[in-house]
Image (tube, rainbow, N blue to C red):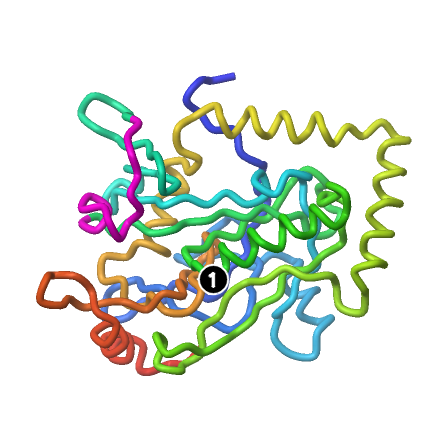
Amino acid sequence: MLKGLVISPPVIGRISIGRIVEKNGKRLPEKDDAFTITTQVQQRGDWLLHPLNESLRKATTGKLRAIPVRFLFNDPNLNLRAEYSLFDRDTGRPVCVGNGETCRRVTEGGITSMGCSTPDACAFGQAGNCKPYGRLNVAIGDEDELGSFVFRTTSFNSIRTLAARLHYFSAVSGNLLSCLPLELRLRGKSTTQSYRSAIYYVDLSVRSGSTLEETIGHARELDTRRRAAGYDQTALDTAARIGFSNGAFEDSIEDGSAVVEEFYPRSDPQDEGDRSNSGGVTQTDSPSAGTDSSGRSTLRDKLERKAVLLGGAAA
């Protein structure tokens, strides 16, 4: 295995909430109030839709706001990885990644480990637009049982909610998270910080029409069948854990450019809502923008700039 290269779950598609649009000669993230499932191929700057996008939409009466999923791993932390992350906007390379206690930062002497005081208390992070950044890998359908669709987000609400749900479902099922039939669900809420406008985040729940007890029963049946067939879930989790620890940064240079465009735009016009993933969209749920007397972003300026750039469009 090549040292320094993170071995992450194979990705066959992306889940996003919105898209990148061109306005006044600039490519900017525009949020949406529904999921979009895409391939990993771009055409004329847009991600091509995955066949599952249409088939799942046809199964609903309106917008795609719920996606049936399973997880590859029993360990919640393998399915969802989240850190404070700062990227070089010019190269797309990760520059600093931390968990609030320690971080790995690119310096002149190479990658250095040091303390992490979170973006709010870190001058280096504030100057470079460091923010929480999460990657969730899920399986959709039975096309590729070890392949996954990735959902990327810089939303505190999404990261916090998904982390809680993953740990809760793992606990109540007796560590059978990979066998649970669940669904990603898009939820909205309003806050005083968002000036009562809607912000969207991603949640995890049992599938529509099912109860938690029924879901756990299905998980136990699947676990029994897998064990009888020789499926070794513990070994799979161990292999994934070793792969993630093989390098300093999970995101490659190739993916980094798309991540920067979607989550770290220079103008950062739309930091409200749930900026979703590398599937071609961006959203966060912590409104902030403009600058105050200390040079830091302010909420009102960001909302006003968003209204100008996006024409006041509502997600």
State whether residue 257 is above or below residue 161: above
Task: Specify the quadrant of the image occupied by residue 146.
Answer: top right
State whether residue 76 is above or below residue 34: above
Number of marks in picture:
1
Whether residue 245 is in magenta: the answer is no
- Residue for badge 1: 157
Q: Nearer the viewer, residue 80 or 255?
A: 80
Task: Specify the quadrant of the image occupied by residue 73.
Answer: top right
Left or right of 7 in this view: 29 = left
Please name the residue shown 39% across and 57% down the image.
45
Left or right of 32 in this view: 254 = left
Please name the residue shown 60% across and 56% down the image.
50
Instruction: Tell which residue pokes out farthest to the left in this image.
Output: 293
Q: Nearer the viewer, residue 257 or 96?
A: 96
Please name the residue shown 55% across and 63% down the image.
202
The percent coordinates of residue 71 (x first, y second) are: 67, 46
The percent coordinates of residue 131 (x first, y second) are: 33, 52
State whether residue 146 is above or below residue 118: above
Q: Amino acid at mark 1?
A: Asn
Q: Nearer the viewer, residue 118 or 222?
A: 118
Q: Residues within 10 Å of mark 1 (few under 14, many from 20)?
A: many
SS category of the residue bearing label 1: helix
Quarter of the image with the C terminus is bottom left
Task: Specify the quadrant of the image occupied by residue 24.
Answer: bottom left
Please name the residue shown 39% across and 28% down the image.
248
Q: Which residues are magenta?
A: 113-127
The percent coordinates of residue 305 (x first, y second) are: 23, 75
Whether residue 114 is in magenta: the answer is yes
The percent coordinates of residue 59 (x first, y second) are: 73, 71
